[in-house]
Image (tube, grey):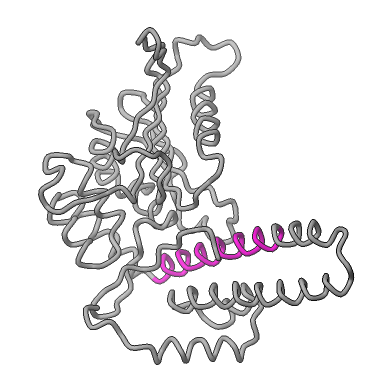
Amino acid sequence: MLRRNFPPEITTPDGSFIMSPKNDFAFRLLFGDEKNKDITIAFLRAMLHIPVKDIKIKDPFLLKQVSGDKTGILDIRIVLDSGVQVDVEIQLTDHPAIRERVLYYLSRLYSSQISAGDGYHLLKKTISLVILDYNLFEIEPMHTMFRLYDRKNEIELTDVLEVHIVELPKLKYDGRQHKNDPEIPWLMFLNAATKEELIMAAEAEPKVAKAYDRLRDMSEDEESRRAYEERITEIIEVDLRMHAAEERGEKRGREEGREEGREEGIEVGEEIGEIKKGISAAKKMISLGMDDETIIKVTELPAEKIAQLRSEAESEPKNESE
């Protein structure tokens, strides 16, 4: 089983393609483009609950730079008109060291503001906004904020380092809850799985409506869609390689001290397991509309098997509500 929660495209009644804004590529394409600066400003105001008049996006996201880029660095670095630095990212994987990672990038961004010989007074507040597609804390609130604080004496050392963590699975909205919370429409937008849910979020906030319009424009652009699908393929490839490496390590451990005949039986079982993983990945990629050549390259399944899976997918009954 793949560990990453892959957000497919949005489900639409007519089958038209709309990117999921929760996909990290689509997220940065939307919020990391200077042309969408007003959308990003409204998003930051709502999520951080601070006044923002203007922003400068550092290293703006350029679609032409995506092709062939396998770095996977899809965070957005922003400087507010007040000088405050903000690093924004959406994380789909249940990262085992997410706390350490967030602190590492936050401290690096903070310290990068000055060079040797500069005064420390030049350092500006730095905020990390991390949106998770999984639960990190065993508490009910979905938005937590952290600073350097002495709990015993209830003294805050400073507010210049601040971490906001938002857990999307905790979002619950029935039209009455959080009525006056400005971040709810944005989180509804990011967490949407259907076109109807996108429209509901757009109707709740004008700037979300503009973000929805921009998302549809992005989805209709052939180059953007191709890059979006390449990003999903890249993620699948990385996860498959990681799982294969882990399986090899576990296999070597199991092989120690076992008889040769038993080892051969285990290898056969593991090969079957690998095939099942490939089939699972292929089904996901077929549902995303990817071509057979790409699926064969990633899963290493034979063309005949891909054709069989595609035929089975096409013969499955459609959900009448879609």
Total labels drawn: 0
In percent of width and height, residue 15 lies at 29, 79
Name the spot of residue 179 as percent of width and height, x first.
Answer: 11, 43
Asked whether, in this view, residue 93 is left or right of residue 156, the answer is right
Q: Residue at x 49, y 74 (%)?
A: 285
Identify which residue is drawn at 24% across, 48% down.
Answer: 186
Q: Is residue 268 left or right of residue 310?
A: right
Along the line of sight, which residue is nearer the eye, 16 or 62?
Answer: 16
Judge left or right: residue 226 versus residue 39. Answer: right
Quarter placement of the N terminus: bottom right
**Nearer to the camera, 145 or 52:** 145
Q: Quadrant of residue 234?
A: bottom right
Magenta segment includes 193: no
Q: Classify 266 as above or below 307.
A: above
Image-quadrant location for residue 270: bottom right
Which quadrant is the C terminus positioned in?
bottom left
Q: Residue at x 61, y 91 (%)?
A: 304
Magenta-tinted stretch: 222-245
> Which residue is drawn at the image coordinates 17% and 39% (left, top)?
181
Q: What predominant SS class does the magenta segment belong to?
A: helix
List x then y, in percent, for residue 160: 40, 19
Front residue (pair 32, 62): 32
Q: Position of residue 233 (x, y in %)?
A: 54, 67
Q: From the viewer's perspective, is residue 300 above or below residue 72?
A: below
